[in-house]
Amino acid sequence: MFFNFTKPTKEVDNMIYRTLSAPLSVQIEITDNCNQVCTHCYRACQHIKKAVSKHLLPSQAEKLVEELARWKVMSVCFTGGEPLMFKETLKAGIRKAKELGLVVYCNTNLQLLTREMSDFFYQNSVGILTSLLSHQPEIHDVIIQREGFHKRLLSNVLMLTETGVLTSANMVVRKENAHQVYETGKLAHSLGILRFSATKVAPSPDTEYRNYRATPQQIKESMDALLHLQSDLGLWVEILETYPLCFIGDMKKYQQFLRRNCTAGVFNCSISPDGSIRPCAHADMTYGNLFEKSLQECWFAMQEWRDGTFLYEKCRICPHLLRCSGGCRMDAKIFYNDIHGKDPLMTGPEKVNFAENTSQLDFQLPNNLKFVKGVQIRAEEFGGVVKYNDELVFLNKAGYNTVLNLLSGNKYFSWKEVDVEGVSVKDRELFFKVLFDKKMFLVS
């Protein structure tokens, strides 16, 4: 039987926190320097050591990427601080990643973008994520504490999109801009941005979170605004952080936001500019240094992020845990000073409403399919993982071998004629529906 996270069988449940051979995606922080001073900045590497700012050299970035490729990491995101402050390091890392077959992204505020860098991003198929905090310049610039940056941001976003660079924007939802999600999304759409997200501001060490925290009602309204942007403009919308299911509540209405749960130390991790490795960009806990140890050695040391050690006690017995993951552990740590505490948005399982059928698999599956370009697959002890963009499906050995063979064929096939011993037609159809729902197929 194939298995995946969308089908809650016992076989699936038992593997959600399995230790993979290595992360699937990794963030490399080029520097902890930044040319903006966002009052909400969560970057934990700024707070781990009160020391002089650090940045990677080009040769160090290449070495880190080589280590990721050695363990078959699928994608890398270069971030910061502001990575464009060290362009040569950024370019060296991107070149090495493309040479070794990794999918590459870059998170940048774009203030230092040049025509040469825009062309470089395009030539190397680098996906860009930037921050747009308001459609109003005065709000954006006050939050980042830099006058005139909003105007330059819009100009540089246009440079990217007109060059053909795939560009996304995230809006950090705070108390003072929460009512502006729709208008900000409209502005992003007019600039050629393909994906727009609006994500609640996270607690940050050494900041007065309550001064800028969005209320639960404002966060819900931001999700509603995203849905309106999608229906009105056809804009791809999402959130970039995990929200507890009990906060989301209406599973049918907000179904597309449910795929975001905590993957820190489970699928992903972050590397600080000094080479130390953390479960995620928010985390202030390190598990070794990649200039001293292997990626796998550091990855295996993060077991406490996979075995439920940090879960809030009430989440442990919640029937929705496997789908929710218990919210954000770092939000709990910073907000309540307790990593075992509840997510600040948590309400309780009685608020979760799975009314009616929330399944996305109730459709007629086309017969002739072909995997789209960019689908990645990696072997694991239990079988393997197939990934496309942000979507994952975990496979047993039969499923892994089936997908591997179809990918290597690189041609259209009839799913009805794919014969796997011991797998019924119904289960086979369900398997290919899951992959189809995750946009992994072309249709003839």
Image: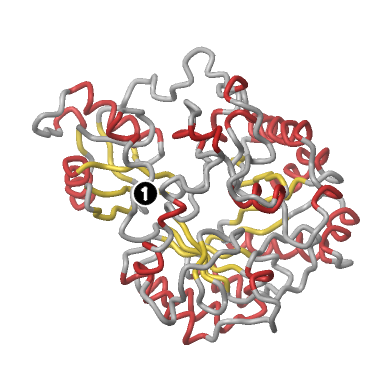
The part of the image, by quadrant, that contains residue 142 is bottom right
Q: Is residue 4 left or right of residue 407?
A: right
Q: Quadrant of the N terminus?
A: top left
Q: Which residue is mark 1?
A: 387
Q: Is residue 444 visible?
A: no
Q: Residue farthest to the left?
A: 421
Q: Is residue 363 left or right of residue 339?
A: left
Viewer-nearest residue: 354 or 437: 354
Q: Secondary structure at mark 1?
A: strand
The part of the image, by quadrant, that contains residue 151 is bottom right
**Residue found at x 68% / y 81%:** 53
* Residue 225, percent from left and from top: 73, 33
Viewer-nearest residue: 6 or 133: 6
The relative height of residue 92 versus residue 143 in the rendered view (above or below) is: below
**Residue found at x 32% / y 35%:** 12
* Residue 264, percent from left and from top: 50, 53
